[in-house]
Amino acid sequence: MKPAPFEYVRPDSVAQACEMLAADEDARIIAGGQTLVPMLAMRLARAAKLIDIYRLPELNGIRVEGDVLVIGATTRQVQVERSALAMQSTPLLSKALPWVGHPPTRNRGTVGGSVANADPSAEIPLVAVTLGAEIEITNPDGVTSMPADDFFIGPMLTSVMPGDCVTAVRFPIWRHARVGTAFHEVSARKSDFAFVAAAAQVALDEDGKCIAAALGIGGVGDRALRLDVAKLVGETAGTARLKDIVAEAAAVLEPSSDLHVSAAYRMRVAVAFGVRALEDAMTDACSAATQSNRGAKQWR
Amino acid sequence: MEVTLKVNGRLCSADVEPRKTLLDAIREDLALPGSHAGCEHGVCGACTVLLDGEPVRSCLMFAVQADGYEITTIEGLAPAPGELNVVQDAFCETHGLQCGYCTPGMILTGHALLQRTTEPTREEIVEAISGNICRCTGYGQIVEAIEFAGERLRKANAPRDLKGAGANQPQVDPSAETDAPQEGVLKAAEADTPHGDRP
């Protein structure tokens, strides 16, 4: 369990890191290292040079820019988990974070690292796909960004090109008055890799009618997928025919079998969790509204 | 590569290969073998150390990444040589260990949790140690040990209980005929007794 030798460098800026990365095709970025280090130790991955971006101050931080929550790539998962700003702006992300690894790995692991690693069962990529986040990428030519849907290609496979470095993830903030979220996951042990995970976010109008809905399923296929639940718009919480809508939308999933669970199990649970997540998100949206009403009364 | 690590409050320099994990550097170069090498790929938690007070896996970072942090290993918890910290003592008391391999990681994780709150719920304790694998105890006594250590920490500076009066109530003994009640004056606070007043 010892990695093969490599060279270690710590650049002073993102630009310098990208130059180093572009100059050496066997170089890799390291930040939290919670996946890369075991991969190196088991020699499933090799690198001639590790470029450590963990301490670059410009990459760490959580801020709101208009209707977007911007999370710097090396922001530690625990920072997001404990962030009041993230809880307010993207509660779905905050609900998913306790499911990411274990507390000690969240203390070192980064948001950008989880996204760049693109594990099909990872929670942060699932939330990114569900909410339609943008992944910001920096390379020697400048800064670009791409939708999460295009970024994730397959298991541990992304659209990142040699010389590219993920520098931020931009999560859209829903500004509706009544927004509810829910996250469900099943794994062999708590915080292990998810067999199936479901993330849902809905917005309701004053009468409890759905005006926007998003549902994402992770762990089932070779990447997290956003299901089309547009039919939910106009339906009322409590009476919506969720099961039919989710079952129809789940047809796009391509579940796989492994040592732990079968494809049929994954499909069944994906539909059940999809329904449950949407139901809970609607209930959450209803209670969010009562809470804000209560707050308003107190102000008067 | 030369690296300077601050371990248990002491600055130590070591010449390490970049591929050397923090765990191996602590064990081999700094001669602190209390952090255990278990799986060496981030699954078992036996190598847990505290980095600026937060538990992390020392097998999942390289020594060359660890400069500038306050690193605490199990050797750095006890207040003085030959003594135990309150969490270590609680583990002894509640039989929170058997073979002892996972214990340094468990104790550091429990210690970090109790630094944030001395009144963790059972669920919070279970979540905190969820990344530490124990193959002997079945976890029951480990959870109990952390609960017990929390209880002792809460009581450590609490005023002595008088006739059921709580810590935040005025210490008035209605049956006392004089200002200073005689009974119990010399009784040590519970946290100071060797077995916490347990038989």
Image (tube, helix red, strand yellow):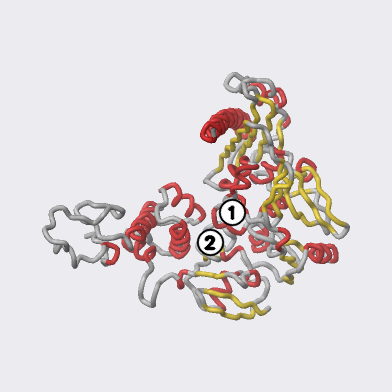
Q: Is residue B91 left or right of residue B55?
A: left
Q: Position of residue A63 (x, y in %)?
A: 69, 50
Q: Is residue A287 left or right of residue B194?
A: right
The chain ID associated with circle 1 is: A
Residue A134 visible? The answer is: yes
Q: Nearer the viewer, residue A130 or A188?
A: A130
Q: CA distance from mark 1 to mark 2?
A: 10 Å
Q: Position of residue B126 (x, y in %)?
A: 45, 50
The residue sitting at 63% across, 46% down in the picture is A86
Give the labeled residue for mark 2: B54
The image quadrant where one finds the N terminus of chain A is: bottom right
Give the labeled residue for mark 1: A78
Q: Secondary structure at mark 1?
A: helix
Quarter where residue A146 is shown: top right
Residue kind at label 1, given as amino acid type: Val
Give the class, few, some or many, for how many residues have Cα within 10 Å of label 2's Cα (few <14, many ≥20).
Answer: many
The residue sitting at 61% across, 35% down in the picture is A181
Q: Position of residue B194 (x, y in %)?
A: 27, 67
Quarter where residue A186 is shown: top right
The residue sitting at 45% across, 60% down in the picture is B115
Q: Is residue A100 above or below residue A203?
A: below
Residue kind at label 2, given as amino acid type: Glu
Asked if the residue at tag 2 contacts the one at tag 1, i.e. Cβ–Cβ closer than 8 Å, the answer is yes
Q: Is residue A49 above or below residue A289?
A: below
Residue A222 visible? The answer is: no
